[in-house]
Image (cartoon, rainbow, N blue to C red):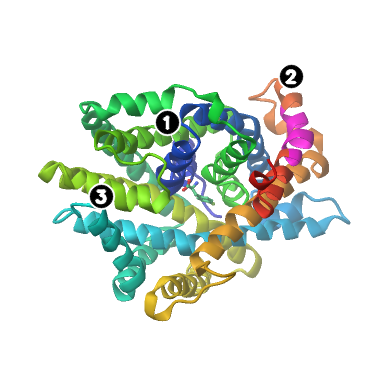
Amino acid sequence: MNSKFSKIGFVLAVAGSAVGLGNAWKFPTLVGQNGGSAFILLYLFLTLCVGFVVFLAELSIGKLSEKDPVNAYKTLAPEGKKAWALAGFTMLGAILLVSFYSLVIAWIVKYAVFSAVTLPSDIQSSTSYFEELVGNSPWLQLACFTFVFLLVFYVVSKGVKNGIERLNVWMMPSLFILLVLMLFYALSKGGSFQAFEFLLKPDFSKISVASILDALGLAFFSLSLGVGTIITYSASLPDRTNFITSTLSIIFINILIGLMMGLIVFTFIFEFGADPTQQGPGLIFISLATLFAKLGVVGNILAVCFFVSLFFAGITSAISMIEPFAFYLINTFKFSRLKALVYIGVFVYILGILCILSSNQATAFTFFGNKSFFDVLDYLVQNIIMPIGGLCAAIFVGFVVKKEALQILFAPCMNSFFFELWYFFLRFIVPFIIILIAINSIYPLKQLL
Ligand code: PFF
């Protein structure tokens, strides 16, 4: 990477990566399913104890090496242990992720444009509107997907400073302003009281081992861990940055935006008596679209604002998924940035088309019974690649990287008590917890408990 972020550029770019569709989609869904605020407290706790610890590990791999994930592991591993470079290939997870993540952004584009004019007025028409888009409109999906794809690749082609930083510096504050405006409107509604109660009054009876594991998975996905993104962005971290305050600001922004989105979504859900435990796409694309329709023109404006804010959140995350692999091709094969992006682009575009075809009625193909290609990629990335990536980072930094190098790196911003605490968590607590999540994703403990 030839240029570095500015300090604020780094915080905004990583926050841009972290704040994404996960905040709007997974966060409210899981909160809804797991009984509200007790789950949020759990999520906060795990974000700090596990997410924060792994985040600092990935940050140190990136900063100490200033390389892409594969070369970073290779550079930091001592002679005889260079096979650690393989761990860097977990960045391929981000390439798989961007292909279906961009497709969801493509649906958001379609909703943002169409909700300016029309919104489905009841749940049946809203459901068929969504099913028609996903199951019967391949060309429309392809057009929206191509738009998102070109935008994302164009931004990454401009590089870290002129592309990624520049986009984040205006998109993240715009996202925040849109959310604040929507939140003000939501607060004027009766449903906001129930939404607050639902999100902020803890009900610990709803917490099970399964919800602990869900919260951990969310903490991982939401902080963009395990697929090389944090390693790559940290390679462009400016010197003399306080890693701890930057990381805590990123975590704070991520949680704050998750809560704001949650309050907005649940206010409308309660205002109109819809079901708060409904699942992902159903919650955002089906229920919410219908609820906005009940507000007439104001609803159209709100719907456009809502989908535009999701679009901003999604785009800043999608660009962060491409940079690790592009940086690897540039470093290793001396490709120009453009050439690297063409190679990656062809691959991502084909995967995106396969996702569209797999869910399209006329061309449908499924795996393991009824899983679409989209579901398979989603499962592979979140339940397999991300935990492996996080585990490798924790073990590598905890046991392979020289402790003195880490002490020197963190000395300006962490006292020795906190350093030892972090190091202990990294070596012994985090690997244990990640292995537990992995087992849960392969054989859900829900079935055992
Ligand atoms: N953190 C993003 C979200 O919450 O939507 C998802 C994500 C972005 C995961 C970038 C991984 C990544 F590398």
As measured in the structure, the alpha-carbon distance from the residue carrying label 1 to the one carrying label 2 is 28 Å
User: Quick one: 339 or 129, which is closer to the camera?
Assistant: 129
146 left or right of 340 in image: left
| Residue 47 sits above or below residue 371 on the image | above
Q: Give the amino acid at mark 1.
A: Leu
Q: Position of residue 124 (x, y in %)?
A: 26, 57
Location of mark 2 (residue): 417
Q: Amino acid at mark 3?
A: Ala
Name the residue at 57% across, 29% down.
42
Q: Using the numbered discs, state the Cα–Cα distance from disc 3 to disc 2 in whole angstroms.
A: 50 Å
Q: Nearer the N terminus, badge 3 or badge 1?
A: 1
**Which quadrant of the structure image shows residue 274?**
top left
State the SS at label 2: helix
What label sits on residue 256 in the rendered view? 1
Q: Main secondary structure of the magenta part?
A: helix
- Give the farthest residue toward the left: 297
- Please provide the residue range marked out in magenta: 422-432
Residue at image mark 3: 289
